[in-house]
Amino acid sequence: MGDNNDSYKVISDNRQARFQYEILETYEAGIELMGTEVKSVRAGKVNLRDGFALIRNGEALLLNVQISAHETTRQSFNHDPRRTRRLLLHKDEIRKLTGQVQQQGLTLVPLKMYLKRSWVKVVIGLARGKKLHDKREDIKRREDQRNMQRALKNR
């Protein structure tokens, strides 16, 4: 029986983050979840758009990420959709991120959530906010690429 270590299923992708931020580095982190949260994640009911990560007391925390309540679970057993969740990173990664976030004024944003084998993983990016003119350059570059592809296709 073949062991497929690299198989993963993307659950949620934060495409808006790549438009609003310049991503400098990415880190793969585990995430501490409750049982009903895992069920909702497997069903794809995750929104990363407004999320961000902080480092407090030597722990990486994921804030403002919405994992919807599980439908078939009674409300008294369900989780809070926007609760703060702990990210599972190595101590040296947390130490490195702490220095960069504090000294350079960078932000940690969740880019993607996926299932790797049976584990829920989050890719967080060390990001610098883009200014309006940077966003305009990205739009212009994308339109130029699209126009070149059209011209090649219509030849």
Image (tube, rainbow, N blue to C red):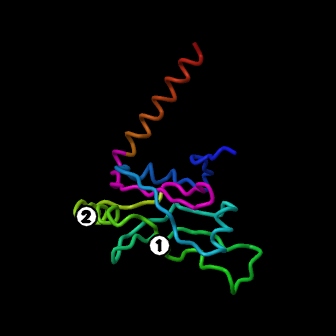
Estimate how packed mark 2 is, as few (under 14), some (14 to 19) or many (20 or more) residues with alpha carbons within 10 Å. Answer: few
Nearer the observer, 6 or 41: 6
- Spatial distance from mark 2 to mark 1, Cα to Cα? 19 Å
Nearer the observer, 144 or 60: 60
Q: Is residue 116 above or below residue 30?
A: above
Callout 1 secondary element: strand
User: Residue 86: which numbered mark, if any?
Assistant: 1
Image quarter where the C terminus lies is top right
Is 120 within the magenta? yes
- Residue lying at 34% horizontally and 74% vertically, measured from the top left: 58
Q: Quadrant of residue 40?
A: bottom right
x, y percentage for residue 28?
46, 56
For mark 2, what is the residue? 99
User: Residue 33: which numbered mark, if any?
Assistant: none
Q: Earlier in the sequence, mark 2 or mark 1?
A: 1
Image quarter where the N terminus lies is top right
Q: Amino acid at mark 1?
A: Arg
Callout 2 secondary element: helix
Q: Amino acid at mark 2?
A: Gly
x, y percentage for residue 85?
50, 73
For the record, the magenta segment spans: 111-134
Q: Quadrant of residue 108?
A: bottom left
- Residue lying at 38% horizontally and 73% vertically, measured from the top left: 59
